[in-house]
């Protein structure tokens, strides 16, 4: 009795496992509909492959319909069963190019079988490689995000883990920067370093046509030196005065071209933009004698005042 | 005299017929000429596919997840999901009509090539989609590149009376390109 108590559950468990395994095996390559499908588990995008269909109840000459949902495509085919209810769908190289998981639906009369085919992307051969900012402030003051969209020859995105970039700063300093990645996209934060100039960025895993270049420019205005062409003019209304502002960042480097400088004086204002760190403005000289103050402002920087004397007789 | 009168009458009939035909031709040409100068740019063609339709929750919605990179603002989430929905709508219209001119509004790069390859000039099918469930995976710091997963949405295709409903998941990369979010990379998994 005791042995029976052990044997019966063991036998039942064995039957359950064997049956389950058989059902799973049947599901792997076919369906419970009586249609058996044989094909590779996985193919690489662009590969040629063959789907073998076996319909035990089928007669030679009867049609089977195939629909395949593959990426954004739908492929339709109709095959005639051969003797023994067998048919083969030959898919040529280059026909299935979209990676992912495709669905195969085979219909014979009222029965249907569904199965999945995994299509792996081909090897990584090309990429979109770009930065969110192509111009950043130098000296480590600003950062840009490098972005990589890697893909294969068929345009499929590929796993983007393990990429890295080589950085060369304007001062000659080099470093290797690992990229974070998920499927289809990789990214890295690149912080500026050293003086203004070009940062060259190249992807280590693929030789792209041209390395990415990030322009590193001077920082915000920090020092302004204001100069007057002459500190004294006659009040005859025939002179022009020229104000020149030399604008530098906190490292003494001329600010980037196009920085706006505002010139102010008692009762008036004007503005100009910098070229090579210099901004200039020309004004008609005052016609009333006296002493006039001028100063310049850019970002948060202020220049010291400069003074212009306007006299009736002589500047001597 | 009889013969002369008959000849005159015949000439009259012929001339009348010719005048009528020429008159109608002239009227048609003048009408076309006038109509040509009455036509401006077609607003429908200018704004085709560019409407900001934010899909209903049952159509598409974001799952609560911040992903890596920048945390999107509610407006950015709306823009992205609207563009993603619009891209699938454009694909459906192309599948139904065969007109692929609208695809570039929502698709770009390799994804556009794939979408274009999926439109069969000989097969017209109705494609419906719903139940998009988007999980953000990455948004770039400048808000111009986004990666997300779309889990188990429903794709229904109707063709010649037959209807197939598919459960699909997608891994998507979209880029903000000249003011429009476009699908740049997409990997689909049918279940």
Image (tube, helix red, strand yellow):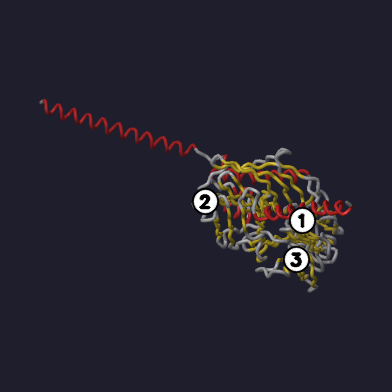
Q: Name the residue under label 2.
A: A59
Label 1 close to label 3 by CB (< 8 Å)? no
- Position of residue B33 measured from the top left corner of the image (x, y, whole percent): 42, 38
Report which residue position mark 3 lands on.
A163
Letter of the chain that mark 2 sits on in the rendering = A
Taking A164 as reference, is A49 left or right?
left
Q: Which residue is drawn at 51% across and 55% down?
A: A82
Query: Are callouts 3 and 2 both on one chain?
Result: yes
Name the residue beneath numbered marker 1: A260
Say whether residue A307 is left or right of residue B87.
Answer: right
Q: Which chain carries label 1?
A: A
Give the image location of residue B185, x and y in percent: 67, 55
Q: Nearer the viewer, residue A98 or A61?
A: A61
Mark 1 Cα shell of 10 Å, populated few (<14), some (14-19), many (≥20): some
| Label 2 SS | loop
Crowding at mark 3 (Cα within 10 Å: few <14, some 14-19, many 20+): many
B137 lies above or below A138: above
Q: Where is residue A105 in the image (x, y as percent from the top left)?
A: 61, 50
Where disc 1 sits, the SS reads strand
Depth check: A227 or A221 in front? A221
């Amino acid at each position: 009795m005791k042995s029976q108590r052990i044997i019966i559950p063991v036998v039942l468990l064995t039957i359950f496992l064997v049956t389950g395994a058989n059902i799973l095996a049947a599901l792997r390559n076919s369906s419970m509909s009586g249609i058996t499908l044989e094909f590779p588990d996985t193919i690489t995008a662009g590969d040629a492959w063959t789907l073998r269909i076996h319909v035990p109840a089928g007669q030679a000459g009867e049609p089977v319909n195939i629909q395949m949902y593959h990426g954004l495509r739908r492929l339709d085919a109709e095959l005639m069963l051969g003797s023994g209810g067998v048919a083969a769908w030959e898919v040529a190289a280059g026909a299935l190019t979209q990676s992912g998981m495709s669905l195969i639906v085979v219909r014979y009369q009222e029965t249907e079988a569904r199965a999945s085919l995994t299509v792996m992307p081909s090897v990584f051969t090309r990429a979109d490689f770009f930065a969110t900012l192509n111009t950043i402030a130098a000296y480590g003051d600003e950062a840009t995000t490098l972005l990589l969209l890697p893909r294969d020859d068929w345009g499929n995105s590929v796993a983007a883990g393990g990429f890295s970039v080589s950085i060369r700063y304007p001062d000659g300093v080099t470093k290797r920067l690992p990229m974070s990645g998920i499927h289809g996209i990789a990214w890295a934060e690149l912080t500026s370093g050293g003086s203004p100039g070009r940062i060259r960025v190249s992807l280590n895993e693929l030789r792209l046509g041209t390395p990415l270049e990030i322009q590193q420019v001077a920082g915000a205005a920090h020092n302004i030196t204001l100069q007057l062409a002459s500190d004294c003019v006659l009040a005859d209304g025939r002179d022009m005065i020229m104000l020149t502002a030399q604008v530098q960042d906190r490292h003494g480097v001329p600010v980037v071209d196009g920085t706006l400088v505002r010139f102010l004086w008692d009762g008036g204002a004007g503005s100009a933009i910098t070229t090579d760190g210099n901004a200039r403005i020309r004004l008609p000289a005052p016609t009333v004698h006296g002493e006039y103050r001028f100063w310049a402002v850019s970002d948060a920087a202020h220049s010291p005042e400069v003074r212009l004397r306007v006299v009736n007789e002589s500047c001597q | 005299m009889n013969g002369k009168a008959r000849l005159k009458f015949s000439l009259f009939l012929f001339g009348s017929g010719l005048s009528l035909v020429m008159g109608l031709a002239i009227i048609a040409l003048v009408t076309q000429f006038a109509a040509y100068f009455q036509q401006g740019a077609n607003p429908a063609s200018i704004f085709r596919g560019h409407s900001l339709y934010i899909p209903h929750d049952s159509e598409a919605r974001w799952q609560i997840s911040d992903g890596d990179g920048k945390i999107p603002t509610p407006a950015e989430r709306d823009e992205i999901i609207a563009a993603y929905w619009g891209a699938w709508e454009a694909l459906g219209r192309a599948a139904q009509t065969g007109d692929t001119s609208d695809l570039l509004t929502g698709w770009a790069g390799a994804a556009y090539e794939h979408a274009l390859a999926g439109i069969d000039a000989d097969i017209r099918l109705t494609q419906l989609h719903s139940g998009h469930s988007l999980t953000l995976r990455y948004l770039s710091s400048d808000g111009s590149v986004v990666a997300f997963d779309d889990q188990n949405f429903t794709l229904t295709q109707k063709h010649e009376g037959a209807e197939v409903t598919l459960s699909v998941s997608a891994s998507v990369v979209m880029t903000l390109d000249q003011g429009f979010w476009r699908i740049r990379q997409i990997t689909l998994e049918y279940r």
